[in-house]
Image (spheres, rainbow, N blue to C red):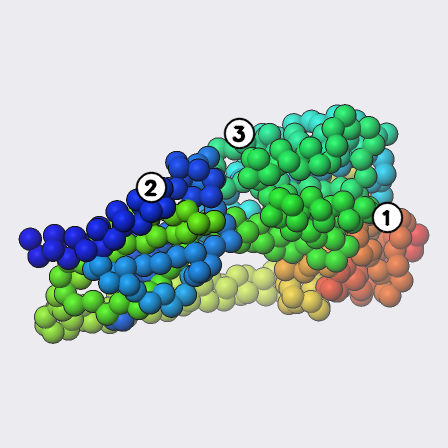
Amino acid sequence: MNFAKRLFPYCFVICIAQALGGGLANSAGADGKLTIAAISRSASEVTLRVSVRDDAQHPIRGLTASNFSVRVDGSPGRIIRVQPTDNDRPLAAILLVDISKSMSGKPMRRALDSAGRLVDEAGQNDALCLMTFGEAVNLVSDYGSGRDEIARAISDIQPSDQRTLLNSAVLAGARKAEKSPLDRTAVVLFTDGVDQGSKISLGQAIAEAQKASVPFYTVSCGRHPESGTLMRISELTDGAYRNAADDTYSLFQTIRDGLKDEYDVTVSAPLSPGSHGVAVTATIAGQTLSAVKPITVPAPRHPASKSRSRTWWVLGIALLIAAVAAFWLVTRKIRDLEGDQMEAEDKDGAPAPRTWVDAPLPADAARARRTGKVWLQISTGRHAGSRLDLTGQPVLVGRDSRSQLALTSDPAVSRRHAEITLTNTGEFVLRDLGSENGTALNGNDLGEGIVTLRDGDRIAVGGSELVYRDTRPRLANNTRR
C-alpha cells in the first residue's frame, strides 16, 4: 500500500505527458522505445542506464541532459549529468578493402597494416567480416570467421583490378551491415576515395547507409587520396575519418565509443530505506518516450555483519598474497635450476639440444654446429633484455604475435618486418620483408638485399635494436655479401 501511494503521483504525471505528447513516441514514430536497463545508487545519487530507440529499433545517439527529465516518487529530480554508457557489449565490424591497382605499393601496405591492427584490437566476442572491392565487391570472410583466419586473409590481399567501384562498395557494405548478427555494427573503409564506373551515385550509397543507421569509418590510404569524399562519407553516416599515414592506433576503440547507444542518467536523489519509483522521460523533436522503474533501498546492515564482511575481505587478500609469493618462489627456483644446468653445460662443453634444417653442410660447418652458440639479444626498445637462441629454423621478426621474435609493443615494427635464416654453409643471413620503416644493419639501410650476419652486428627494426651474437669458430667462407 505504501509503495502504491508513492507510485501513483508519477504514474499520473507520465499519463498526462503521454496524452499531451501523443503517447509513447519519438522523432521516428510511435513505435519507439525507452528502456531503463539498470540502476545503481550511492548515498545521494541514483544513476539509471537508459536505452532510447526509434520506430525501426535503431539506437538514438547524441542525446544530452536537455533531452531527459526524471521524477522520483512523483517529484522532479535534479539531473546531475547524462553521458554515453561505457559498456563492453560486443560489436560487428565490416572491413572493406580497396584492391584496385591505384592502391599498389605503399598505399596497400598501409591499408593492410591498418586492417591487421584493427583485427588485433578486436575483442574475442566481436564479429568481423572482410570484403574487398575493385571492379566488383567480393565477400572474403563472413561473420563468424576467427581473428586468425581474418588476419591470414588480409595478408593475402593484393591490388589487382583496373577500376574502383567505390560507390557500389559503400552500398554493399551498408547492406551487409543490415545482416549483422549483432545490434551494433560499423563499416571500416580502406581506400584512396576514387570511384571509377559505379552505376549509382555517392549520394545514393550514403542514403542507403543512413537508412540502415550504419556508421562508416574511412581510412585514407592512397598517394593522392580524395580526402573530401572520404570525410563526406564519414560525416554523413556518423562515423569518423582517419589517414593511414598518420595514426590508426586504437581505431577499434574509436568505433566502440561511437556505437555506444545507452546513457547513464545521474540524478540527485537521497533515498530513505523502502520502496520508491523513478520515471524517465526523453523528449526528441517535441515528442516523448517514457519508462518507469521501481527502486528498493535496503535497510542499513547490522554492524556485526559489516565486521564479518571485513574479516572475509582481509582473509581473502592474505590468501591472495600468499599464493603470489608461493608462485614467485617456485618460479625463481625453476630459473635457478635452469641457470645451474646451463652453467654445467658450458663447463662440460655440451651445448643444449638444437633443431637444425636438413640441408647438407660442409664438414667445417657441421663441426661449427657442435661448438659455440648463436643468439639474438634485444639491447634497446620496449623489449630490451629479451634473448632468442637461433636453432637453425627460420626466424620471423615482426609485430605479429605469431612471429618467432614478436615485438608486439613496438608500434614502428611491421607485422612481418624481417627474417633470419640459416644457409647450407652454416651462416645466418638477414633480409627485410618490405617493412614500412625498413631494416638497418650497423647503421646502414638493408634495402632489398640479403646480408650475412657476423658476431656483434647490430640490427635496427622499428624502435628496437637486436645484437647478433655468434660464439662458433669462424667459417672460412663467412664473408659479407
**Mark 3 or mark 1, earlier in chain:** 3
Name above or below for residue 242 compared with residue 387: above
Q: Which residue in the structure is indicated by mark 1?
A: 224
Indicate the quadrant where residue 195 lies: top right
Q: Is residue 34 left or right of residue 206?
A: left
Residue 468 relative to residue 281: left or right: right
| Residue 444 place in picture, x, y as percent | 89, 62
Q: Residue at x 30, y 44 (%)?
A: 19
Q: Name the kind of residue labelled 3 in the image.
A: Lys
Picture residue at 39% right of the left edge, 57% below the top = 68
Q: Mark 2–mark 3 contact, CB under 8 Å? A: no
Q: Amino acid at mark 1?
A: His
Q: Nearer the viewer, mark 1 or mark 2?
A: 2
Mark 1 residue element: loop
Distance between the alpha carbons at the discs numbered 1 and 2 = 53 Å
Q: Disc 3 marks which residue?
A: 179
Image location (x, y in percent) of residue 12? 21, 51
Residue labelled with disc 2? 23
Helix, strand or loop for disc 3: loop
Q: CA distance from mark 3 to mark 1?
A: 34 Å
**Element marked by disc 2:** loop
Instruction: In the rendered view, tell whether residue 195 sits above or below residue 81.
Output: above
For the residue pair 12 and 396, the one nearer the viewer reads as 12
